[in-house]
Amino acid sequence: MSDTAHPLLPAGTPLLRSDAVDLQVGGVDTAEGLLVSPQPEGLAAVLRGLDGRRAQRAVVADAARQGADAGAVAAVLEGLRAAGLLVDVDAVDLLATDAGPAATARHAVETPPSGGWGARRAAVVVVDGATRVGTPLAAVLAASGVGRVSVRDAGLTAAGDVVVGGATAADEGRPRSLAAADAVRRANPLADLRPPTGGTTPDLVVLARPWAASDPTAAGWFRAGVPHLVATVRGSTGVVGPLVLPGVTSCLRCADLHRRDADPRWPQLAAQLTAAEPPPSGATVTCLLTAATAAVQVLAYLDGSAAPAALDATLELVPPDLAPRVRRWTAHPECGCAQREDRTTGDNGP
Ligand SMILES: [Zn+2]
């Protein structure tokens, strides 16, 4: 590892002593830890100072000035890195975080994404539907460093819309879009709440209304080439996915055609499901788990760190256990949306 790395040890990592010479770093629960014995002079202070803002070279030099053995400190840092306890921050990426002591404190508890903060900070996400899933999800995304989060909704807040992390009881009767904006602001006062304007297309749209996937208006996002993710509760079941990357994955129409194949009456049923706005639904735990599961998908996509699990699939969270069940949605041969032929074959799941 180069000595130009900017090591960060998450502030919540335990530093534990069993005697005067030992220091255990992490290693509680199932996470790997490192036992340093004997510990170099002043090691705990050096480790608590690892905020990702100084190059490792500077960290070691500062420790040596304080009387520590530079070689021993460097060896401990390598050990922590090998144990997966250290995060190496790109120095340039620090500029992508918000300035000020409050923002710094918020970032300190969010482990930096593997690709750095830059992609999240630059991202524009639209949440369509200030629902019991959509609003807390928007707040989670803003708290996780997504720079611009806009929630779309033309309705008024009802008592049933109130949910932890979302609309409050005091919002009843207010426009849902304003209640959602306030929820996002509570999570991150510096989040940009403006909707995309002037030809700006969002990086991703979350469809948070219960039957948005069957709503023909959702096809507009496909035509515009904007990635979109379904995140909602239908009845009592949380549904996350599919995450549609237009031209790459299967689309919402594919899923609709598969449903029609399974039941020829589906188009008639779907028209009824989308004809009127259903009442708020979903228990608080279901809504929040759905929002958090969806946030994991959105952040994985924005960070580019891992293939989101909701590509060509939905994750269904069914009470009471709410353990995610994966349902695969392959491209439908009649749809013609996906360009890769190998996506037109395969199992359509349960
Ligand atoms: Zn399709």
Image (cartoon, rainbow, N blue to C red):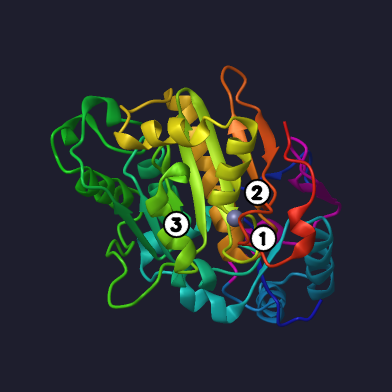
Q: Residue furthest left?
A: 173
Q: Is residue 46 magenta?
A: yes
Residue 165 against residue 285 in the figure, above or below: below
Mark found first going from the N terminus, 3 or 1:
1
Which quadrant does ligand 1 occupy? bottom right
Q: Position of residue 38 (x, y in %)?
A: 85, 54
Q: Amino acid at mark 3?
A: Ala
Q: Quadrant of the C terminus?
A: top right
Residue marked by disc 1: 47
The answer to whether one can see residue 21 in this image is no
Label tally: 3
Q: Secondary structure at mark 3?
A: helix
The quarter of the displayed image where residue 245 is located: bottom right
Q: Say left or right for 93 vs 276.
A: right
Q: Secondary structure at mark 2?
A: loop
Residue marked by disc 3: 219
CA gap between label 2 and label 1 equals 10 Å
Cβ–Cβ under 8 Å for marks 2 and 3: no
